[in-house]
Amino acid sequence: MAAKTYPLLPVEEAAALILQHTAPLGTERVRASEAYGRVLARELRAPIPMPPFDASTVDGYAVLSTDSSPRRQVLAVITAGRPVATPVAAGTAVRIMTGGPLPPGADAVIMQEYTRQEDGTVVLQRAVRAGENVNPRGADIAEGQVVLTPGTPLGPAELGLLASLGVTEVEVYRRPRVAVLSTGDEIVEAEQEVPYGAIRDSNRPSLMAAVREAGGEPLSLGIARDDEDVQRRLIRQGLEQADVLLTSGGVSVGTRDLIKPLLEELGTVYIGQVALKPGKPLTFARVGERLAFGLPGNPVSSLVSFEVFVRPALRKLQGHARLHRPTVEVVLEHDVRKTPDRTEYQRAIVTYHPDGTLRARTTGSQASSRLLSMVGANALLHVPPGQGVLPAGTRTRALLVGELLTA
Ligand code: AMP
Ligand code: MG
């Protein structure tokens, strides 16, 4: 089986083309308690105001701010959750605790620290402004206000907000199911003994974890030998069970590289190579509504290709408003050698310095087989094609793929 020849696409063009072929999956209703990490599909308006009543923000006395007499008769005590209907008028006050609903008539709360108690009365030691220490009904959130927009991922703050508004079910996008297949006659399971000439499958665990991080549900298709029928069967199986198929290996120009011709046979291949190092042989196809990515076999190439091309697509499938990682400008801490013909994404560690700069140093040898170049990396450094080096001190772009460090 021989593959067609494909134009070498610039990275941005290939990434944009993939997103053109990607549309959000359907939605489903889930309980808010199960919705962590899901992406909201519908705008949410507050069904009630927050706070739902005028609430005291301190422990003190609810009073009338226009009353100028320093001494007030204490009529009742309000604790959080225990309102009283006793109205406050001139010459009176109601003792109130933080979170307690203001009694009728009162328009301010004086902090306990500015008062003195004297047999059944309270003496105010300073004047009180209208509204002092009161969080008025609807001050945090007005009734009907849009509080969450579609495409928002539900994290701790969002889930707390839903609960406070009494929203116990939400409509979210379906998570993409992603079938992951490793290929290669030399590839064996991690728990297996490794015969001479074989290597353990590191791409499947890497890619399945990357799928999970991107919000997808990974599904293992195992390892396929470099055999046309075996690979065709597993590719078909993956495309039946999942929304997206990820294969690794078998997309180069070797005699046993079968993924491109098989995807040509089953669907339409839109991308056959990209001007990226590592990851040149990236392949992207559509089979009906399903997406198929043929990622390169080298462990670093497959992960970098995932980051650049697959992750944004998985986020688009699940309706995320933000598809891309942030790109920042960094200052190189040392010389970086360029590659003549391709943009290189060097794995780097970016650190924030007290002078306000982000500084980058690479993770050492950038061989595409060297998984250690990915370990601890929080950025992919854009190294434009060319001769020679980018000297230390050069400013260049970097894609932040992990947590920023501080010096
Ligand atoms: P290929 O593109 O199939 O020629 O693979 C390129 C390189 O990546 C070869 O050295 C393979 O042994 C290696 N490789 C392919 N698949 C995997 C995998 N699943 N885990 C680790 N290395 C792999
Ligand atoms: Mg192979």
Image: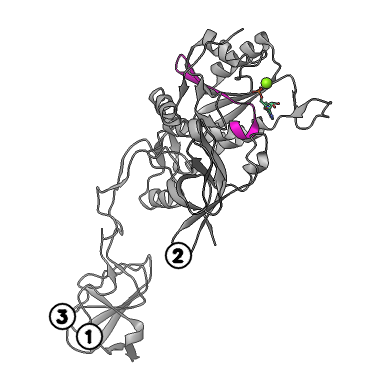
In terms of image quarters, where does ligand 1 lie? top right
Q: Position of residue 57 (x, y in %)?
A: 34, 71
Considering depth in this image, is 90 or 134 the residue closer to the camera?
Answer: 134
- Name the N-terminal-most of marks 3 and 2: 3
Considering depth in this image, is 386 or 241 the residue closer to the camera?
Answer: 386
Q: Is residue 28 visible?
A: no
> In the image, is residue 248 above or below residue 45?
above
Q: Amino acid at mark 2?
A: Asp
> In the image, is residue 305 above or below residue 98?
above
Q: Quadrant of the N terminus?
A: top right
* Residue range of the region highlighted in magenta in the rendering: 284-301
Considering depth in this image, is 148 or 184 the residue closer to the camera?
Answer: 184
Q: Residues within 10 Å of mark 2 (few under 14, many from 20)?
A: few
> In the image, is residue 353 above or below residue 190?
below
Find disc 3 in the rendering and name its residue.
Answer: 66
Q: Amino acid at mark 1?
A: Ala
Instruction: Using residue 313 as the reference point, say whether residue 147 is left or right of it.
Output: left
Secondary element at image label 1? loop
**In this rendering, the label closer to the viewer, 2 or 1:** 2
Q: Residues within 10 Å of mark 1 (few under 14, many from 20)?
A: some
**In this rendering, the label closer to the viewer, 1 or 3:** 1
Find disc 2 in the rendering and name its residue.
Answer: 355
**Marks 3 and 2, how far apart at CA:** 52 Å
Res 235 quadrant in image:
top right
Q: Residue at x 51, y 43 (%)?
A: 381
Q: Position of residue 127 (x, y in %)?
A: 22, 85
Find disc 1 in the rendering and name its residue.
Answer: 127
